Image: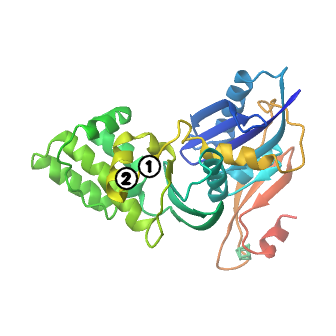
Amino acid sequence: MKKAYLGIDIGSISTKGVVIDENNNIIASSYLYTEANPIKATKKVVKELKQQLDLDKYKVVGVGTTGSARKLIGTILGANTIKNEITAHAIGAMSIHPDVKTIFEIGGQDSKIIIINNGIVTDYAMNTLCAAGTGSFLSSQAKRLGIPIEEFGNIALSSNNPTKIAARCTVFAESDLVHKSQIGHKKEDIIAGLCYAIVNNYLNNVGKGKKIKPPIVFQGGVSKNIGVVKAFEKVTGHKIYVDDNSHLTGALGVAILSKAEDEIDFSFDIEDIIYETKGIECKGCSNNCEIIEVIKDKKIIDSWGNRCPKGELIHK
Ligand code: SF4
């Protein structure tokens, strides 16, 4: 039997999964919407991966999770690796571009920048506050303009005169966009302008004060939008590398990281496993931490969210 490793990246918008072989080649992959139910989405992703995999040939001996629900899903899958998104994305990107110095990542809900020097993450930033630099903003504006998001990038490229759109925040960008449509700007110019707005917002917020050096790799769902890629190239003056699997890099990274841990015996049969999660507010102090408990067979098997040991004790 050949060894294989599973990586799952559970974000608030999408859940991504890959299975890799010992040489880090992706041999199965899946991408689904989380739809506010990370457990259900993970079960579906794992089922799809199982269908793609030759189980007579491969045995999964490592499981890694990353993304906002990494702890929950990691507990449920019995993962041997649970890592934050920065580490997972950096490792995934370096496995494809070993000399990468800057990683731009724009996902559905948040965006990140990672600065790498000699294979080590030396700086990073995450933005979860301003939605005007994310995929969900792009999707909602595409909808407003009546354009399928898949066509967005190519339409942007047909513009010779991108409209200038104020990109300070969602509210500004949205009202400016409505204003520009009303005064007769062409649709393709507005769309191209939106791509620039995303890029400028990203560079002025997430990228603020960061030493952006080439090679630059662009990851996350928005990297599939050629309009945004070209806008990044124009504004930074550098080539932007986008891999075919740029939306799966976090899952790839955490699958690679699972190789360094003790092997586990992973079975794909998680379909019938029933887990319950419960959110409890700790009243131990004014922080009022929201503690999440994972319950199986009426027993708490894991909990997190407490900022101090006092919160942990409540549930022991
Ligand atoms: S877990 Fe600790 S910090 Fe959080 S509310 Fe409870 S006592 Fe306060």
Residue positioned most to the left: 183
Q: Secondary structure at mark 2?
A: helix
Residue 221's place in the image compared with 168, above or below, is above
Which is in the foreground here, disc 1 or disc 2? 1
Quadrant of the drawing holding the C terminus: bottom right
Residue at 49% across, 43% down: 242
Q: Secondary structure at mark 1?
A: strand
Dot 1 corresponds to which residue?
240
Residues marked 1 and 2 touching at CB (< 8 Å): yes
In this view of the protein, which residue sits in the foreground, 109 or 244? 244
Q: Position of residue 291 (x, y in %)?
A: 71, 63
Residue 110's place in the image compared with 73, above or below, is below
In this view of the protein, which residue sits in the foreground, 106 or 40? 106
Disc with the residue nearer the chain's start (1 vs 2): 2
Q: Position of residue 226 (x, y in %)?
A: 37, 40
Question: Can residue 301 be seen?
Answer: yes
